[in-house]
Image (tube, rainbow, N blue to C red):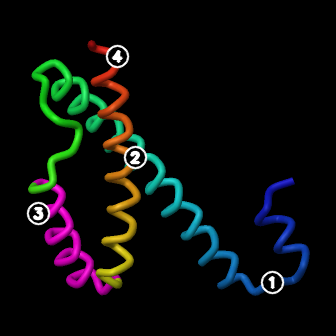
Amino acid sequence: MDETMTEAAKGLPAELLRLRASINNIDAAVIYMLSERFKITKEVGRLKAAHALPPADLEREKEQIARLRRLAAEAELDPDFAEKFLAFVIKEVIHHHINAASTTR
């Protein structure tokens, strides 16, 4: 049975169901966007490995953190949260880059 139907059967307000449906759509979009981002960063990892470049680029990371903090502030999202989220993503990307480098040797 559809989750929305189950919740509707519980007598939850229609507005709450509408908001939850919006959250579900946004979550799906975030997942697909992350998937696309990681497809690109895996390509970056392959290029770095092919050119014997280090998996991490601290200057690029510093620039990205500053950029995302600005974007977060503009979007009225906590910049600290945005930075933590980006740090998590960067850690995973570097892990992929290290793996790419080890498979090309």
Q: Earlier in the sequence, mark 1 or mark 4?
A: 1
Residue 21 at what x, y percent from top left?
A: 62, 68
Residue 15, placed above or below residue 49 = below
Q: Secondary structure at mark 1?
A: loop
Residue 82, placed above or below residue 78 = above
Number of the front mark, 4 or 3: 4
User: Which amino acid type corresponds to the residue marked 2 in the rendered image?
Assistant: Glu
Point out the residue furthest to the top here.
105
Q: What's the distance in space between the residues labelled 1 and 3, CA to CA?
A: 45 Å
How many other residues sit within 10 Å of disc 1, few (<14), some (14-19) or many (≥20)? few
The magenta segment: 60-77
Q: Secondary structure at mark 2?
A: helix
How many other residues sit within 10 Å of disc 4, few (<14), some (14-19) or many (≥20)? few
Residue carrying label 3: 63
Label 1 close to label 4 by CB (< 8 Å): no
Q: Earlier in the sequence, mark 4 or mark 2?
A: 2
Number of the front mark, 1 or 2: 2
Label 1 close to label 3 by CB (< 8 Å): no
User: Which amino acid type corresponds to the residue marked 1 in the rendered image?
Assistant: Leu
Label 1 close to label 2 by CB (< 8 Å): no
Q: Front-most of 19 and 87?
A: 87
Q: What's the distance in space between the residues labelled 4 and 2, CA to CA?
A: 17 Å
Residue carrying label 1: 12
Residue carrying label 2: 92
Task: Tell me what residue is drawn at x 31 percent, y 43 percent.
Answer: 94
